Amino acid sequence: MIIVGLTGSIASGKSTVAGIFEELGAHLIDWDLLAREAVRPHKEAWKGIVEYFGKEVLNDDRTFNRQKLGEIVFGDPEKLAKLNQIVHPAVIEEDARRVLKIKRLNPKAIVIKDIPLLFEIGYQDSVDKVVVVYAGRKNQLERMIEKRGLSLEEAQNRIGAQMPLEEKIKRADFVIQNDGLMEATRRQVEEVYRQLSEPAK
């Protein structure tokens, strides 16, 4: 089994790349999805967030208002760190459970962990290889403004809350450029997957 950490910066196209890896046969563990599961109403992480940030970050159905929570944490490194501190233990526990299940089914599996904050939380030493998805800042901002409805300031704050992409690239085993056509991105992912498959045989 080979464990691959897939990361990048917000709106760099990690989900697109992760989807291609999955199509090629890799097992995908999406930490964003694990985090959403971890903060469902009345779970431990949910309770911790409500206790720290207050009930004003909740919707009427007791789920979190992600927009409101984002506005609070992405302009305040201390509060962002606190949010991650509350959520990540539950995510890491579920991640370990899924890896064990995959290993039982396929000991030679390639596991792609889509982890947006791979370096920020110091998790890079827990994976065998690191793949960084790169997109230029202009593309990142446009994607966040057009697809996510964020203001320019909100988009810049979210990019600024993460480690610079250039720094992540220095620490990567593979870099996938995602500024061009989908076909070009797919070819790069296929080549990385081919290289990852060699030791997994």
Image (cartoon, rainbow, N blue to C red):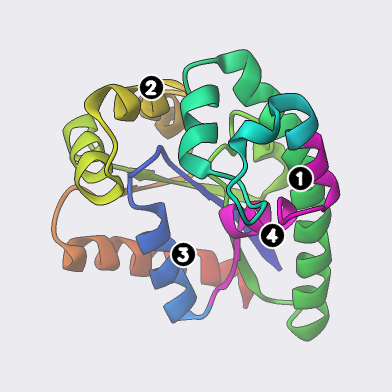
- Please indicate, yes or no, whether residue 200 appears anywhere in the rendered image: yes
How far apart in space, not on screen, are marks 4 and 2 (Cα)? 25 Å
Q: Position of residue 185 (x, y in %)?
A: 25, 60
- Mark 3 or mark 4, whichever is nearer to me: 4
Q: Earlier in the sequence, mark 3 or mark 4?
A: 4
Q: Are marks 3 and 4 in contact (CB under 8 Å)?
A: no
- Amino acid type of disc 2? Asn
Mark number, residue 46: 1
Q: Position of residue 93 (x, y in %)?
A: 83, 54
48 vs 127, nearest the viewer: 48
Q: Residue at x 60, y 28 (%)?
A: 120
Residue labelled with disc 2: 157
Q: Quadrant of residue 153?
A: top left
Q: Residue at x 62, y 42 (%)?
A: 58
Mark number, residue 85: none
- Mark 2 or mark 3, whichever is nearer to me: 2
Residue labelled with disc 4: 37
How far apart in space, not on screen, are marks 3 and 4 (Cα)? 32 Å
Residue labelled with disc 3: 195
Q: Earlier in the sequence, mark 2 or mark 3?
A: 2
Q: Earlier in the sequence, mark 1 or mark 2?
A: 1
Q: Quadrant of residue 31?
A: bottom right
Q: Position of residue 191 (x, y in %)?
A: 35, 65
- Amino acid type of disc 4? Glu
| Secondary-structure class at tag 1 | helix
Q: Earlier in the sequence, mark 4 or mark 2?
A: 4
Q: Residue at x 62, y 32 (%)?
A: 56
